[in-house]
Amino acid sequence: MSRWRNNVLTRRRIGEFIRRLAERNELVGRASFRFSRYIDTNPRNSHFKRSVQALRAPFQPTMSFHDVLEVTVALREADVKFWFAGGWGIDVLVGLQSRNHLDLDIVIEDYRRDEPRVCRALSHLGYVRREPKVGGIWMPSVVALSDMSGRRIELMEIDWERFGVDSGLVSSDGTGVAVNALRERAFAEGVIFDEKLPCLSRTAQLLFHSNFKLTDKQRRDLDVLKESQD
């Protein structure tokens, strides 16, 4: 039994078999979805979660490029200024999809004003606003949305004061460049699959991946960004 628990490949194959069965049987599909949600309620480092994570892998919803384009169209129609961050933001910036993405991070320029408008626009795509999350040192305000399949979107607000000081554009006494210049330094555009999309700049991505403990996934994303400079 211990040998089976440690065999990740075996668990992935079992998970894939269950996924195919769930596609043919509605009851199995519902049960597997609830099981996946139950795994999420367990602490990240719990023995149970580590043991079944590979089994759950085939059921994890992904945020495809098609999903990204749908969100792009919805937010442009809502006349909201936004930029992609996180893993998809890096992929857009470097011009290639480096991995599957479980969520989509979006920075909103005027978060206080436009966050409700963004949520309304995304509701037409099936996304429901969840409880606000505790943000990080760079993005203090974060709200999550998800749909029935489990796809997730996180809306974020940049701490402009901290970004200005740590990027060297603003001194600690508050003097420095104008807000518009900060935004020019933070935002960019990338082309991926022949689509031009808004994203965080290389400077912003490098800065926003610093001063906290990175996950393995975040470290891999950062490697992709750094390798694109070579």
Image (tube, helix red, strand yellow):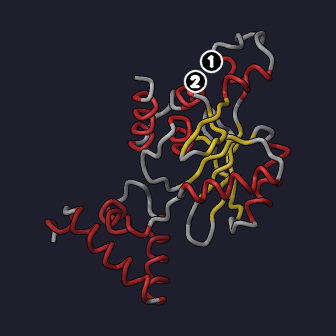
Image mark count: 2
Residue ID at (67%, 17%): 165
Does residue 68 appear left or right of residue 98 in this picture?
right
* Amino acid type for the residue under numbered disc 1: Ser
* Disc with the residue nearer the chain's start (2 vs 1): 1
Find residue 125 and report its horizontal and vertical position in percent.
70, 66
Displayed quadrant of residue 39: bottom left
- At x 75%, y 19%, the residue is 181
Spatial distance from mark 2 to mark 1, Cα to Cα?
Answer: 8 Å
How packed is label 2: few (under 14 Cα within 10 Å), some, or many (20 or more)?
Answer: few
Question: Is residue 71 rendered to the left or right of residue 120?
Answer: left
Which residue lies at the image location 46% right of the left edge and 31% below the top edge?
Answer: 225
Against 68, residue 13 (above or below) is below
- Position above or below: 137 against 34: above
Which residue sits at x=61%, y=45%?
195
What label does residue 203 carry, if any? Answer: 2
Label 1 crowd bin: few (<14), some (14–19), many (20+), radius 10 Å: some
Q: Residue 38: horizontal and vertical position, in percent?
A: 47, 71
- Name the outermost residue toward the right: 113
Amino acid type, label 2? Thr
> CB of mark 2 within 8 Å of CB of mark 1?
yes
For label 2, the SS is: helix
**Relative to residue 159, is residue 215 depicted above or below?**
below
Check the image and report above or below for 203 versus 197: above
Q: Quadrant of residue 139?
A: top right
Mark number displayed over residue 167: 1
> Residue 149: horizontal and vertical position, in percent?
56, 71
Q: Secondary structure at mark 1?
A: loop
Q: Quadrant of the N terminus?
A: bottom left
